[in-house]
Amino acid sequence: MGERKNFAVAIDGPSGAGKSTLARSVARELGAVYVDTGAIYRTVGYCAWRQGIDPEAAEEICALLPEIQITMGYDAEGLQRMYLNGEDVTKEIRLPQISMYASRVSALPEVRAFLMDMQRDMARRHSVVMDGRDIGTVVLPQADVKIFLTASVEDRARRRWEELKDRGTPKDFDELLEEIRQRDYNDAHRAAAPLRAAEDAVYLDTTGNTFEKSRGQVLEIIKEHIGQ
Ligand code: DC
């Protein structure tokens, strides 16, 4: 990309809309770094879970923050890895019970503030495709492209069901559907940086799409905005 300044693509949306798979794939195509911000919140959620702390006990979670160091890195295949006090917890943060912990701790403004610099710093140093809930609205309001990615709740539960089955930690479909509804509600109704589309975001509903179709649509939107 020669002398071109760094660009930033913000992809926000509810759980299971396909953000991470799509963002990772288009980042590779564009030569940008993929930043999965959900993984950062999951690391805090995992830390609370491991220490037996109620994820809604604000005081206890806030007391935990100065004690912990969260860092991220990339392995030889370019996959993002998360470290908690230097320990690689990339796998552990995907345990099914951590999803709700991450959603709960992410409602605390102190947690959001604690993780903000880390996210902005990535975008300062690299061209990024960053996915999350508040990237276009709060973390990178100046992003070159903002996409709000969504799909029906049934489609999202089905994708999550397949993902967990492939990972060897299957879960009941109805339970997943209920959990996704609950997480949607938490993520959209919290006071601190609730999930919503930025005014200048392009809205993309991937219900019923194949991965290739959604990928093509996302790339088209990005290329329209950054002229690659
Ligand atoms: O994308 P994910 O499911 O891995 O995210 C886990 C939780 O973290 C999700 O329920 C909401 C929260 N989150 C957030 O509040 N802000 C972000 N930018 C990313 C994730």
Image (spheres, grey):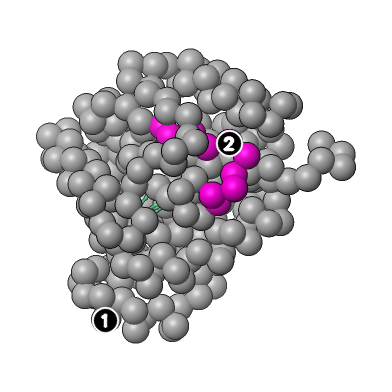
Image spot of residue 90 (x, y percent): 47, 56
> Against 46, is 10 above or below?
above
Ligand 1: does it lie within 8 Å of the C-beta at label 1?
no
Seen at 53% across and 42% down, the residue is 10
Q: Name which residue type carries label 1.
A: Glu
Mark 1 burial class by Cα count in 10 Å: few <14, some 14-19, many 20+: few
> Against 146, is 142 above or below?
below
Image spot of residue 73 (x, y percent): 61, 58
- Asked if the residue at tag 1 contacts the one at tag 2, i.e. Cβ–Cβ closer than 8 Å, the answer is no
Image spot of residue 16 (x, y percent): 33, 36
Seen at 55% across and 51% down, the residue is 140
SS class, disc 1: helix
Q: Is residue 8 magenta?
A: no
Seen at 26% across and 57% down, the residue is 190
Residue underneath mark 1: 59
Image spot of residue 37 (x, y percent): 47, 53
Ligand 1: does it lie within 8 Å of the C-beta at label 2?
no
Q: Which residues are magenta?
A: 140-149
Q: Which one is earlier in the sequence, the residue at label 2 or at label 1?
A: 1
Residue 186 appearing in the image: yes
Q: Quadrant of residue 33?
A: top right
Task: Please count the marks in the image.
Answer: 2
Residue underneath mark 2: 145
Q: Quadrant of residue 3?
A: top right
Mark 2 burial class by Cα count in 10 Å: few <14, some 14-19, many 20+: many
